[in-house]
Amino acid sequence: MWLRSFAVAFALHVSVAGANAAGPFGSVNVGNWIGGAFSNDQTGAFSHCAATTPYANGVILVVSQNAAGTWSLAFASPSYRFNKGESAAIDVTFDGQAQARLYATAYQSNMLTAIMPLNVVRTFQKASLMVATAGRAVLNFDLTSTRPVISALANCVSKVKADGLDKAGDFTKGAAKPAATAERQASPPAGGKPARSKSGTGFVVSASGHIVTNHHVVDGCAGDIKGNLTGEAAMVLRVVSSDSNNDLALLQAPSTTTFKDFARIRDRSIRSGDSVVAIGFPYHGLLTSDFTVTTGIVSSLSGMRNDSRFLQISAPVQPGNSGGPLFDSTGHVVGVVTGKIPALRIAAATGNIPENINFAIKTGVLRDFLDNSVVPYQTAEPKSELKTTDIAANARPYTMLISCNGTEQADAKR
């Protein structure tokens, strides 16, 4: 309770870029966030809009947008003792994926303030967990109501600049998504949510062009689902069948397309300790446009809570690897990559960051799915081992980038 009281008091005396501030004028009250508009205490002119929220770790987050439209993120605590003007680099990681380095300055002895670029603001809006690292200090922040608070602050700045501080009111009313932080999006489907690009990986399992991927890769796709072999034009794929329980989906290429090369499924059980190779398209649009190759071993023959449908693997995978093939050392499919352990959530719960814990759907589950879908796939027994480079070269003609536009509502379910 004392921390909440400090946050309230702190909102009244927040300062940005060294200027003392008076306020709040009007209010921003979203979830645990409180704040409003503030003026420069020396000139009386409108300075910025800000909102704060306290955390049990003793730190208060302060998000603000100034009159010029610049966004800031501040970390405050009554226990901090900074020299004014002191600077520090703060690395922030959102949901274990997106990372950014912020450069913060101590304008007050108990607060570090950093400018947030627009891409960081967008990520901050969508994320559910932020980890901030400064030197040896590592702090976790569960992010709730970030999207509406950003909208409310942008609304606050817009209204105060137009109407003045004396007409300040409830800035959460009528707040829209700020244009300054809006992403370029495709036109929304009729009656649907705005569309956002999403992608994963798939692999061909028959000469007729049947393609396996994860259910969550194509779930909620709006419009065409496209498949790209590296260096080739995209083709429109149709969904043949889908199994949300086992996270599998079957797609098919156009009937005019045939495949000379396709994956063979291993016809023998794999063992703990066996080598594996994962191939996929992680972070498409940010990393290489070609697929990436990672190696590891089978760490366990079961997944989370002894789920026997999955393999646990140490081969590194990232968002975008989902639906990709997992190969044994002879180049046969032994699983479908489906995800990784939520490292930051585990770290928040246990105090330790898990490493190299990823999962793939076993071929037994995959074969049942293909049998039920009447797909003429082929199996093979493992024989001579191949170099990783040869496994990757063999996989190139049938490993696909899968992409589509997905609604925000669908993304929220992922």
Image (cartoon, rainbow, N blue to C red):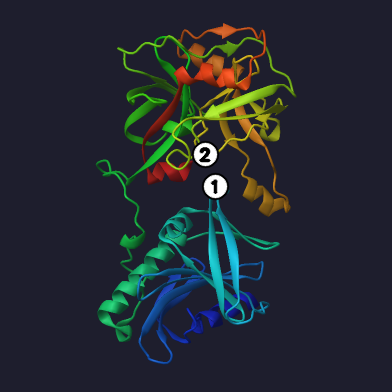
Is residue 99 found left or right of 166 in the rendered image?
right
What residue would you read off at disc 1?
97
Residue shown at the point (29%, 75%) measured from the top left: 159
Residue shown at the point (36%, 68%) measured from the top left: 154
Is residue 50 found left or right of 69 in the rendered image?
right
SS for dot 1: loop
Disc 1 packing (10 Å; few <14; some 14–19; many ≥20): few
Please determine whether, in this image, residue 322 is positioned above or below residue 53.
above
What residue would you read off at disc 2?
319
> What is the quadrant of residue 341 in the picture?
top right
Give how far across and how far down residue 293 sits, in percent.
57, 29
Please determine whether, in this image, residue 48 is positioned above or below residue 269.
below
Q: Are marks 1 and 2 in contact (CB under 8 Å)?
A: yes
Please determine whether, in this image, residue 399 is positioned above or below residue 4.
above
Q: Does residue 365 appear in this view?
A: no
Is residue 130 found left or right of 123 in the rendered image?
right
From the viewer's side, name the closer residue of 100 and 191: 100
